[in-house]
Amino acid sequence: MMQFVAQASHEVVPPDVLEPVLRALVNNFVTERNSSDVMAIGLNAIREMCSRAPLVMTEDLLRDLAQYKNYRERSVMMAAKSLIHVYRSSMPHLLHKKDRGRPTEASLEIVARKYGEVDAKEFVPGAEILLETENNESCDDSDESGDEWVNVSHSEDEISGDENIDGEDEDVDDSDDEENDDTESNSDTEEINDTDQSISTQNSTTNPITKKKKVISKKEQLAEKKEKAAQVSSMRILSDEDFKRIEIAQLSKQMTSAKNRKRPAEPEEKSRGELVRLKDIENIYKKRKHDKQTRIDSIKKGQEGREKFGYKDGRLNPFSSKTNREKKKTKNFMMIKHKAKGKVKKSFKDKQIALRNHLTKLKKMK
């Protein structure tokens, strides 16, 4: 019955018509007086219904159902988390802030649709990545061309001028050298003062006139991306490689920076179709109880290739005879109880003699 209800709900059905059905499912199934399996099935049915018609859910009801994510039973907890995941990708504003997850580029692009609204796009979503890759390739080409060597040729006038200067320097007297040193020192001090003044004036002009960074809002960023995607979609015919790049870029938008330590869920073999599957409603995340035979099989499977548990024989030859002490452990107690009683009644002197004889016997064996 719940499968047919979920199948009959879609975006064109008015939310006012489906709201009593949703309330009936919540009141009759998702209550703590029922078993955990019944609650999980009810939450799964609500999830399938809301994934096809998300406008049925109200904010208060969704936040109440989201509280079952901390329920003691795993099946109910996983069903509530799956309902939260549905509204994260469709209408995240209905969820509490802590249930919306980390914001990603894909979550910023989500726009809640009203009743009867069709999200028809004139471009391929994510096509702006193709424009960025082309710009990067052009920048790489320009960098490679700029790294080439440049040959510089000196003119004949510069060479002749250098030779004349060298000749004049050789004819200068010592007195002229002293005068030149004084004039050079004065000119150097004047140049240093001029440079200090120019640096101070530059700092005074740049410090008060600081460039303010423009803060671009999220809406403007989205509008810019849409313009780029529309430009790429209208200018060229996209190939299979372009669609692969777009798909990779769209998947990267949904990834967050934090790495999940748990094992990722196995991807479904078939994508969600138009028909609602019964196993999606009856799916309960719970460890099933195994019967006796399956438990025995799992135990035997775990014992394969393992060493035998128990006493480890340290003899080099396993077929050699055992000592009397080893044989005594396997004997019946009724056979050795008289000897044990005699040991208890032994005097201290008899124990000393027995110990001395034992030690001398060990020495002889060595």
Image (tube, helix red, strand yellow):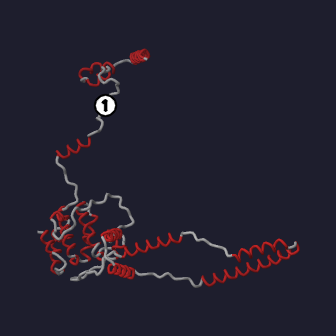
Is residue 117 visible in this depiction of the protein? Answer: yes
Vertical order, 323 against 77 (above or below): above
Is residue 34 visible in this depiction of the protein? Answer: no
Q: How many marks?
A: 1
Vertical order, 38 against 361 (above or below): below
- Which residue is rendered at x = 43% and y = 74% of the image? 135
- Which residue is rendered at x = 38% and y = 81% of the image? 224
- Which residue is rendered at x = 85% and y = 76% of the image? 179
Q: Quadrant of residue 355?
A: top left
**Percent x, y of residue 356:** 42, 16
Q: In which quadrant is the N terminus drawn?
A: bottom left
Give whichever of 186, 236 is nearer the camera: 236
Q: Residues within 10 Å of mark 1 (few under 14, many from 20)?
A: few
**Percent x, y of residue 28:** 15, 69
Q: Which residue is mark 1?
A: 311
Secondary structure type for disc 1: loop
Q: Quadrant of residue 184?
A: bottom right
Q: Residue furthest right?
A: 175
Give whichever of 118, 322 is nearer the camera: 118
Q: In which quadrant is the C terminus drawn?
A: top left
**Percent x, y of residue 215:** 45, 81
Q: Residue furthest front?
A: 156
Instruction: Name the amino acid, label 1.
Output: Tyr
Give whichever of 277, 294 is nearer the camera: 277
In the shown orientation, is residue 203 left or right of residue 169?
Answer: left
Q: Quadrant of residue 221?
A: bottom left
In the shown orientation, is residue 47 left or right of residue 205?
Answer: left
**Percent x, y of residue 333:** 25, 24
Q: Residue furthest left?
A: 1
